[in-house]
Image (spheres, rainbow, N blue to C red):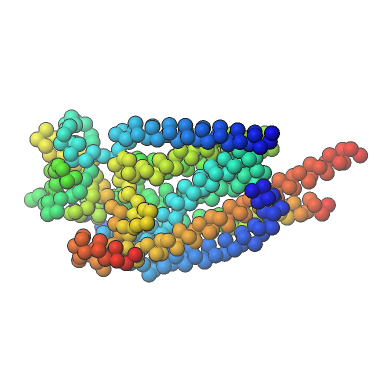
Amino acid sequence: MREAMDPWTFIAASYAIGVGATVAMIGWSLLSMRRAEKRRDDARKR
Amino acid sequence: MHGFANPARFLRIARWLMPLCMGAGIVVAFGALGWGLLAAPAERLQGETVRIVYLHVPAAWLGMAGWMGIAVASFTELVWRHPLAGIAARACAVPGAVFTAVCLITGSLWGRPAWGTWWVWDGRLTSMLVLLFLYFGWMALSQASEASDGGQSKAPAIFGLVGAVNIPIIHYSVTWWNSLHQPPSITMGKSAMSGAFLWPLLFAMLGFTLIFGGVVLARMRAILANQQAEARLRRKALAAGDL
Amino acid sequence: MAIKAKHQRLVLLVIALVVLIGAGLLAAWALRNQASYFYVPSEIVADPPAPDRAVRLGGMVEQGSIKTQPDGVTISFVVQDGEARVPVTFKGIAPSLFVEGSGVVAEGKMRTDGTFIADNLLAKHDENYVPREMQNMTDAQAKQVVAETQ
């Protein structure tokens, strides 16, 4: 007897995790950069 | 070499290079994923499951490239004491760890339908899991040494170089030892992969590499800005104390 | 003076790296037998493991060797590596990639009569990726097409 599985469940889970992690990482790096540069510019102004 | 390590010059370049890498990377990577998901063919034996390759292989490459980045930056930091080298090493850690985790998770999701198991303790899978733990250890060490003496410690740089030994072990694990994981499909100059899979895969690797570069540049800008803000605040506190 | 210190650091670090990589490669070489995930048929035939020891056997499923026993759930097949062949019996559900001419890793025990009793099967995919449209071709034809399309 051979196993029969729906491959699309595994493909969908992989893409959701891979794309989700990439997008979250991009967003976090841009936000933390903007916050840090704003903090530096504020420190300079004052 | 010293000119490039100048933070002001770095910022002038990173200001346009970071959005360029990020934007081009997003377009190329997600375009390649769509190609792989919708247009690329199913494989003869594996069927549709093969589409996981377009995420798994770029993630594996960047998980390893992240540590190579840490190692090269650590070497530069130890030999030439460039002010940006330590910052570059710290900027590689999070994206490297994220891609290593994505590689392990997508690999597990691929292994279940293809091999019939989520996980085995063979050479390739074990050495890749070791890489993830090396990232966790490195991040903890760099955090700790920064807190104590303002990032002057050499410990993370030495750890970064020692940990680089794992990279050739990951790469050769499938040739040195019998493993459940397949040997590499793409080797120097030749490919055992049909062009129908190879092209979307190469574009996915290019796209994710650009995203990786963009994230590293953004992290470097963030770390640099935080350091500059802290230095400015410290100087102000000193000046106020003198009054 | 500054240049001298820089050079000294460079040389010391390069020596340290060479020693480190040498040690790593040596350790990996020493582990080459322990770290292998399975034995190939020629190793199993040359030095059969004790009948009560759980081992893994890995190799190619011989063409035309998969046979379903009369009970309908037990299958028997032959694993070979080009030098030796080991007959295997397995009762259970095989992974979907378990096919003739492809790789397999069987977990189980070696009986004294030379048959391997597997209680779990894992399918091993090789490095060749061929589109499904070419599935009716022979392996040699498929490889030819792959070589032409890249």
Q: How many marks?
A: 0
Q: Is residue B156 visible?
A: no
Seen in the picture, residue C14 relative to A8 is either above or below; the reply is above
The residue lying furthest to the bottom in this view is B39
What residue is rendered at 15% in x and 50% in y? C62
Q: Quadrant of the C terminus of chain B?
A: top right
The residue nearer to you, when weighing B128 against A25, is B128
What residue is rendered at 47% in x and 32% in y? C19
What residue is rendered at 46% in x and 56% in y? A18
Q: Is residue B107 visible?
A: yes
Seen in the picture, residue B235 relative to A26 is either above or below; the reply is above
Viewed as shown, does residue B76 lie left or right of C37? right
What residue is rendered at 14% in x and 46% in y? C78
Q: Position of residue A25 (x, y in %)?
A: 55, 54
Q: Position of residue B96 (x, y in %)?
A: 51, 48
Q: Position of residue C43 (x, y in %)?
A: 20, 36
Viewed as shown, does residue C109 lie left or right of B222? left
Q: Position of residue C87 (x, y in %)?
A: 13, 43
Q: Splitting the image into 4 quarters, where does residue B143 fall?
A: top right
The residue nearer to you, when weighing C117 against C48, is C48
Viewed as shown, does residue B95 lie left or right of B153? left
The residue lying furthest to the left in this view is C70
Seen in the picture, residue B195 relative to B147 is either above or below; the reply is below
